[in-house]
Each structure stands twice: as C-alpha cells, then as structure tokens.
Image (cartoon, rainbow, N blue to C red):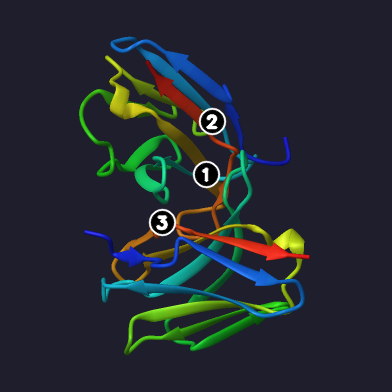
C-alpha cells in the first residue's frame, strides 16, 4: 500500500521552462513533507520541505505547494536548468504522530531538462 | 569527514552468505537511519538509532537483518543467510537529532548472486 505516490515516472522539459513534479499521499497523519533530489550513484540530497501549517514554501528557483484537502503537493522549478536533471523523491513524515524521524518516500520522478 | 560515508560502495555476495555494511555518520549527529532502495522504488525505512539504541526497528524485513551502533557513532547493518531478494541499495542517513533534516550517504549496492 503506497502511502506516498508519484504517478509520473518521468518528465522532460526544455531548459528555461517550468518543471512541475507532483506527489499525492494517503496517510492523514503526515504533516511534514520533503523533496529530495538524487543523482546516479549518489545518495538523496535534501531540496526543500513544507510543514502542513503552510501551503507554500519557496527557496530560490524551487517552490513547494501543499494542498491538504486534496492530499497533494507539487514541486515547481523555474527556470529549469540542465543540472536539475535527476530523480526527485517526494517524502513525508508524521511529526505530531511521534514518528517524525521516519520518512516515507514515493517511487520518484526522473526529470530530464533538455538544453 | 564532511558527509555520511558508507563502505563498501558495492558488494557482491553469494546466496546464503553473511554481509556487513558500514556507515560513518556526520560527526555530532545523534540520529542515524538505515533505508533500503530496491530497483524502481523509493527508499524504504529499515531502522532508526538515537544514540546507541535502536529506537525503531520496525522496518527490518525479518530476523536475518540486524543493526548495531555500539558507541553512538558508526553503525553496521548485518544480513545473515543472504537471499537474492536482498539485492538493493542500502542507504544510511544521519541527522543532528531525530526529526531534523537527514543527510544521506551514497549507499552500498548489494548484489546477491
């Protein structure tokens, strides 16, 4: 039973355009959400996070939006750069549930940014 | 070192053998985690240490898997009687304390033949 779902295995965008990566979750106990980026042969690297008390968090070219009623979040990258090409993982944890240390990951979306 | 270090990077072993995977966390990080990433999947939680003790080992798939962190720093994941289904990338992460941002190592790719 996948509690965090990334339904798009891959996404291809042109350099300079916006990349939108989507993530859905089913567990209502999740209240903290993160995006990790992973290059081949490297471990995941933290990118950006959002608490359930917010609906948006921005950090430079990266913005995460959270829609709690729809149990949906998205990562926007604008403008996209070729160096952004990687696998992006959505992850969630439950701070209020006492398991804030345990991340539940989606399967990832491979983003390819074409020059 | 500056980051989480995992050794070896790659390990090939025969079915039925015993393996140990090592993780050196970031200095000063009290929380340490092991995750397993199978092909085409996201990382899956295995175990969480706070200091020397395993605070949550609910993700370990069965009793062939065991992990230790005797001095609250380096951790070893031990797998007995390996099976082909154990083949995966084993990721270690550490954080300043439980629930704060986790930093991942590059992983150990285990292949059981």
Secondary structure of the residue carrying tag 3 is loop
Tell me the residue at 49%/34% (across/down). B72
Tell me the residue at 28%/37% (across/down). B60
Q: Quadrant of the C terminus of chain B?
A: top left
Tell me the residue at 47%/16% (across/down). B12
| Rendering coords of residue B59 (x, y %) | 28, 43
Q: Name the residue tied to disc 3.
A: A107
Locate residue B94 relative to residue B2 in the image: left or right.
Answer: left
Secondary structure of the residue carrying tag 1 is strand
Secondary structure of the residue carrying tag 2 is strand
Which of the numbered marks, if any, corresponds to residue A102? none
Q: Name the residue tied to disc 2.
A: B23
The subunit letter for the residue under badge 3 reads A
Q: Quadrant of residue A76?
A: bottom right
Q: Quadrant of the N terminus of chain B?
A: top right
Which of the numbered marks, if any, corresponds to residue B93? 1
The subunit letter for the residue under badge 2 reads B
The subunit letter for the residue under badge 1 reads B
Q: Dots 3 and 2: beta carbons under 8 Å?
A: no
Of B10 and A86, nearer the camera is A86
> In whole angstroms, how far apart are the C-alphas of marks 3 and 2?
24 Å
Q: Residues within 10 Å of mark 3 (few under 14, many from 20)?
A: many
| Rendering coords of residue A30 (x, y %) | 33, 72
Name above or below for residue B8 compared with residue B99: above
Locate residue A73 relative to residue A27 in the image: left or right.
Answer: right
Q: Dots 2 and 1: beta carbons under 8 Å?
A: no
Q: Quadrant of residue A104?
A: bottom left
Of A53 and B44, nearer the camera is B44
> In whole angstroms, how far apart are the C-alphas of marks 2 and 1?
8 Å
């Amino acid at each position: 039973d996948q509690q965090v779902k990334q339904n798009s295995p891959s996404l291809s965008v042109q350099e300079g355009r916006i990349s939108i990566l989507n993530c859905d979750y089913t567990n209502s106990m999740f209240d903290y959400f993160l995006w990790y980026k992973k290059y081949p042969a490297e471990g995941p690297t933290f990118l950006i996070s959002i608490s359930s008390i917010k609906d948006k968090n921005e950090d430079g070219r990266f913005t995460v939006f959270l829609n709690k009623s729809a149990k949906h979040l998205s990562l926007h990258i604008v403008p996209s750069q070729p160096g952004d090409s990687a696998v992006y993982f959505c992850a969630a944890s439950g701070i209020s549930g006492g398991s804030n240390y345990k991340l539940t990951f989606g399967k990832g979306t491979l983003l390819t940014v074409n020059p | 070192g500056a980051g989480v270090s995992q050794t070896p990077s790659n390990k090939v072993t025969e079915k039925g053998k015993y393996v140990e995977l090592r993780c050196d966390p970031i200095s000063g990080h009290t929380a340490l985690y092991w995750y397993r990433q199978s092909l085409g999947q996201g990382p899956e939680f295995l175990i969480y240490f706070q200091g020397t003790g395993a605070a949550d080992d609910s993700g370990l798939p069965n009793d062939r898997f065991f992990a230790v962190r005797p001095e609250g720093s380096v951790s070893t994941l031990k797998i007995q009687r390996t099976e082909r289904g154990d083949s995966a990338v084993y990721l270690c992460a550490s954080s300043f304390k439980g629930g704060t941002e986790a930093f991942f190592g590059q992983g150990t790719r285990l292949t059981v033949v």
